[in-house]
Amino acid sequence: MTETAPTQILLVDDELTLREPLAEYLARQGFAVQSAESAAAARSAMLDFTPDLVLLDIMMPGEDGLSLCRHLVEARGLPVILLTAKGEATDRIIGLEIGADDYVVKPFEPRELVARIRSVLRRASKAGPASATEEDVVFVFEGWQLDPLKQKLIDPEGAVISISTAEYRLLLAFLERPRQVLDRDQLLDMVQGREAHLFDRAVDNQISRLRRKIERNSRNPELILTVRGGGYRFAADVRRAPAETVSPAPTEDR
């Protein structure tokens, strides 16, 4: 019988007194853990392997955790859980806005962290490449294309538009439910998997970022409409088309 490979975790934290015991605990829970004491060390480690999830401290000397988080989300599409101090509420919000999947506040209960890791991995699996029955399907709307298998967004001129994991999840939620009103709690759960009302503004900011990418005029949106007191509605018709019927686009990102 073939054994399933353990989940690869990259733990990035400059505090040795936290990093070593936490790595040992996660290993006892069945995870394969590699540790890094800085963003630079994390980038170097990822030259040799790709983790399934990154545990990332925000406050570190040198490149901080938010900068590395942006790279991990936008360039590598990796799930990220932030490790934060109690006084870093603003940084937590920024981290969620740029695509982090969750956060835990130090000091934390290791069992809670493991539960959050498994929850994020489940969501990442569901939001990842399309299932085998839909792997050759793309969403088409107003000349745009979203390829769920490659998580690639293509504009009407055929250019590939850079899109973060959080923006991809948000757009996919709209495309799967066109013309339906989705409130902030629904969108927050779909994109971040959190129900905390503290982060309603994170949804609004993600909407603003997505509008700047797909709307002709983000200040007068035609695709993602605000519903007063209700949330947001995707106003365009959406169809699913076999990928082979859609013209290939250039590989350059805009």
Image (cartoon, grey):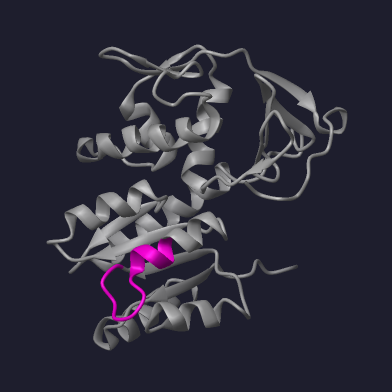
- Residue drawn at x 42%, y 62% is 69
- Residue drawn at x 49%, y 15% is 222
Residue 77 seen by the camera: yes
Instruction: Please tell me in which quadrant of the rendered image residue 47 appears.
Output: bottom right
- Residue drawn at x 35%, y 63% is 66
Position of 64 relative to 115 (above/below): below
Position of 120 relative to 185 (above/below): below
Residue 34 seen by the camera: no
Rendering coords of residue 229 (x, y %):
25, 14
Most distant residue in the right direction? 244
- Residue drawn at x 49%, y 40% is 167
Q: Is residue 67 magenta?
A: yes
Most distant residue in the left direction? 87
Identify which residue, 220 or 11, lies in the foreground. 220
Rendering coords of residue 173 (x, y %):
51, 29
Instruction: Please tell me in which quadrant of the rendered image residue 206 appears.
Output: top left
Q: Is residue 107 magenta?
A: no
Q: Please give the range of residues in magenta.
A: 58-69
